[in-house]
Image: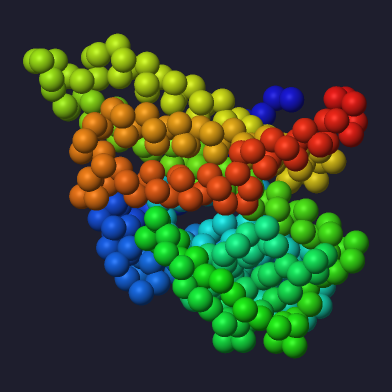
């Protein structure tokens, strides 16, 4: 398969990158950690003006009618700038989930989510916590083979600490009487698989962006930092560290783009591609974080250094929507069930 992004897709990426560079520099992410909601004031509305929340929503519902290919490029930029906004849960999971189902939740929430007037958070049964449940307007939650929409006011929230100051985890209590059924039975199982795949792929894209940013800031640091009269970056060991991280990231990125293509085209092996992408991206980002920390030395441990924000986001997202081991096991089950064909 020959694959390349179109100029239109790259233009969408560049527009988001320009916005985040202007409105979401490290200083504002750091400030967001100390706010009540962990988010950058006004950033979500500006992303909505670019159409980000509704990338996968139909045009007649206020969206752009685009595909996962555009979305992964946007998510990668979100990772690059550690943007503390619900791009993944809202744009990548909740919107297409409601788009592909019928019933009251679609009528109630799809347009509001697509236009950025509301946000969503999603948690499947394997997830012990619901991220950002205190600020999301609607919580999409699994129970068995059912998916339910729960308005925040109808759920009980118990806050828990997080290493990433912009990811606020909550244990959520809710009852069926306070929820609205989205899908169940065979439709519910299909919806759950789609949600898992999209969540994994968009998170993998964020991890690629995080890894690339950690490598970039580390390269800049080792060029500026001198030891024994030479730039630290001229030492062979440092070069090897960064080369290892770069190779891992450049191997994972095509897998992410391939998985996005499979989702966009409803390929029968989309789940395998999604899991492959998430496993590779999780490994690449955690490796990049480790190498970046090693090359920064003691300053890399300092809270005052911006590196920790990308590292902590990478550690958190590497485990989100299934860690590398979970996704490798998922791929193995498919390969063993088909005899490796």
* Residue closest to the eye, 14 or 323: 323
Q: Is residue 2 left or right of residue 254?
A: right
* Residue closest to the eye, 165 or 325: 325
Q: Which residue is at 61% across, 39% downward? A: 324
Q: In which image quadrant can residue 187 be found?
A: bottom right
- Where residue 71 appears, as percent x and y from the top left, is 59, 50
- Where residue 97 appears, as percent x and y from the top left, is 73, 63
Q: Is residue 61 left or right of residue 252?
A: right
Q: Which residue is at 68% across, 40% downward? A: 327
Q: Is residue 158 above or below residue 239?
A: below
Q: Which residue is at 57% across, 64% downward? A: 129
Please identify the quadrant where the N terminus is shown: top right
Q: Which residue is at 56% across, 25% downward? A: 251
Q: Is residue 283 above or below residue 85?
A: above
The answer to whether residue 105 shows anywhere in this view is yes
Q: In which image quadrant can residue 138 be found?
A: bottom right
């Amino acid at each position: 398969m020959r694959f390349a992004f179109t100029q239109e897709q790259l233009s969408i990426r560049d527009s988001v990158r320009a916005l985040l560079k202007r409105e979401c520099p490290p200083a504002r992410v750091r400030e967001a950690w100390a706010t009540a909601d962990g988010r950058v004031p006004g950033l979500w509305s500006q992303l909505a003006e670019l159409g980000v929340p509704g990338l996968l929503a139909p045009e007649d519902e206020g969206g752009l009618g685009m595909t996962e290919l555009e979305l992964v490029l946007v998510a990668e930029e979100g990772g690059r700038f550690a943007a503390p906004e619900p791009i993944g849960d809202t744009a990548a999971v909740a919107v297409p989930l409601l788009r592909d189902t019928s019933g009251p939740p679609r009528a109630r929430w799809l347009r509001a989510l697509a236009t950025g007037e509301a946000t969503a958070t999603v948690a499947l049964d394997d997830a012990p916590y619901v991220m950002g449940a205190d600020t999301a307007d609607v919580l999409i939650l699994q129970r068995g083979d059912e998916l339910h929409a729960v308005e925040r006011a109808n759920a009980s929230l118990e806050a828990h600490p997080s290493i990433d100051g912009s990811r606020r985890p909550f244990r959520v209590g809710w009852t069926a009487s306070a929820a609205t059924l989205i899908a169940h039975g065979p439709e519910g199982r299909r919806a759950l698989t789609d949600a898992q795949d999209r969540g994994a792929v968009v998170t993998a894209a964020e991890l690629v962006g995080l890894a690339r940013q950690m490598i970039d800031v580390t390269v800049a640091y080792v060029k500026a930092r001198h030891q024994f009269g030479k730039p630290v970056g001229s030492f062979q060991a440092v070069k090897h560290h960064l080369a290892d991280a770069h190779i891992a990231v450049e191997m994972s990125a095509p897998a992410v783009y391939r998985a996005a293509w499979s989702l966009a085209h409803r390929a029968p092996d989309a789940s395998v591609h999604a899991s492959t992408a998430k496993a590779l991206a999780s490994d690449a980002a955690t490796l990049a974080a480790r190498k970046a920390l090693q090359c920064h030395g003691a300053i890399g441990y300092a809270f005052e250094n911006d590196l920790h924000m990308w590292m902590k986001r990478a550690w958190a997202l590497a485990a989100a929507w299934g860690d590398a081991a979970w996704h490798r096991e998922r791929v193995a089950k498919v390969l063993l069930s088909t005899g490796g064909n």
